[in-house]
Image (tube, rainbow, N blue to C red):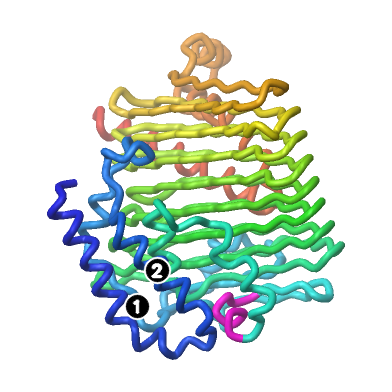
Amino acid sequence: MPATRTKDAKDRYLAAYARAAGDRSRDAGSWITPLRQESIERFAACGFPTTRDEAWRYTSVAPIADTPFVQMPEARADALTPEVFEQLTFEPWECTHLVFVNGRFDPGLSQMRTLPRGVEAGSLSAAIASKRALVEPWLARLAATEGQPFTALNTAFMQDGAFVRVPKGVAVKEAIHLLFVSTSSRTPIMSHPRNLIVAEEGSQITVLESYAGLGGEAYFTNVVTEIAAENTAVVEHAILQRESEASYHVGTLQAHLGRGAALSSHVISLGGALIRNNVNALLASEGADCTLNGLYVTHGRQHVDNHTIIDHARPHGTSRELYKGVLEGRSRGVFDGTIIVRPDAQKTDARQHNKNLILSEEALADSKPTLLINADDVKCSHSATIGQLDENSLFYLRSRGIGDEMARNLLIQAFVSDILARIPVGPVRTGLECLLYTRLHDGHRRRAGATA
């Protein structure tokens, strides 16, 4: 992206920040004003990244920077009919559903169930205003803004999101679903949801974030989620991205793990035109355990970039990472994963794998697994594969009377099954299997039409 375009795009956001000064002056939580100001200054210093930046070498954000997105002043939920809501919430999945429309909490659409005593689940903006003591120690303390322009933009422009807190020793048996819906508008809209999940010592929680769009217009979702898992806490976390085909989505997940804490993260990317997933975990204390799973299924001209960092800072940490991609059409999938083992992180056990299945001649996969090891008593490994459907397996299935489409779909489903099997919520796992089946069937019809 040329320097002049980069400057113009940056100036547009700086002007939008200045225009929103009146709205921010009404913030009940005025203590976040310095956070906002520091973040916009950091964005002003670096601007949007370009492909000359190593962390963005495979992904141009020019389509995001060049589009004059605006924040909607109020949420519009008229398109979220009961039928659409049922599809997006995997009904009859019974749990607490917190619904956000264009980045703002909608209590009328949300469904609250009885939670254990002391558990907080609701609007972050409300928590900023009334529960500062619970929010301030963590908000914008985990996800760095320096050198991270999209995190800086989110912190500067954040309006709402989810605040989930589990007190010490409490186990929440039912999952909590955070549903973010972007509505249709003639003007390209953007939202900057901010989520904060705090699992105190010895607690357990499962949280699913899902993102979807209503309508075919372009919009931009820039989300940041911070997870604090204190000593021996267990957090199961999943992100399901089903944005509309013309949308742009940048997501950052930053987790901080205490002594003996465990985090399992699952990132599923199905929609969107340009997607960037940043997943970062700091194993800050001894004996922490981290699992990162990811699946990206792309077609057409979709571009999905997964950028992960697992930082082992203390001894006896364990991490397992598996990302898989299924790519067809002229789409592109990127995996750039780094495992860091610091000098004090002896006895680290870390494994990282990326596997890609290419279904067309024009699809492209880039894989860059990286180990940065600064300790000598560790067990670490990584691998990457890029390949096509195995012809011998296809021949075997056909020889058993299975048609071409079914044989192909069976092999693809087998390829992704171990990722889907790890999704912690049964209704979501079943819903994803159905979504994938539909996607594969539609792909077969597109290919058949192209060759007719």
Segment colored magenta:
122-129
In reply to whether residue 33 is colored magenta, the answer given is no
Which residue is tagged 2?
Answer: 191
Q: What residue type is labelled 2?
A: Ser
Give the percent coordinates (x, y) of residue 429. 64, 47
The correct choice, above or below, for 33 with respect to 367 in the image is below
Is residue 111 at all visible to an observer of this figure? yes
The correct choice, above or below, for 310 with respect to 189 in the image is above
Q: Which amino acid does label 1 sit on?
A: Met
Q: Is mark 2 on a helix, strand or loop?
A: strand
Residue at x 83%, y 75% (from the top left corner): 117
Instruction: Check contact, mark 2 vs mark 1: CB within 8 A.
Output: yes
Q: Magenta: predominant secondary structure element?
A: helix
Q: Nearer the viewer, residue 99 or 130?
A: 130
- Residue that sits furthest to the front in the current view: 343
Which residue is tagged 1?
Answer: 72
Q: Which of 62 and 323 is in front in this view?
A: 62
Instruction: Count up the numbered dots.
Output: 2
Give the percent coordinates (x, y) of residue 351. 64, 27
The correct choice, above or below, for 270 with respect to 13 in the image is above
92 left or right of 1? Answer: right
Which numbered disc flags the more N-terminal residue, 2 or 1? 1
Q: Is mark 1 on a helix, strand or loop?
A: loop
Residue at x 41%, y 80% (from the top left corner): 76
In reply to whether residue 127 is colored magenta, the answer given is yes
Of the 4 image quadrants, the one containing the C terminus is top left
Give the percent coordinates (x, y) of residue 309. 54, 40
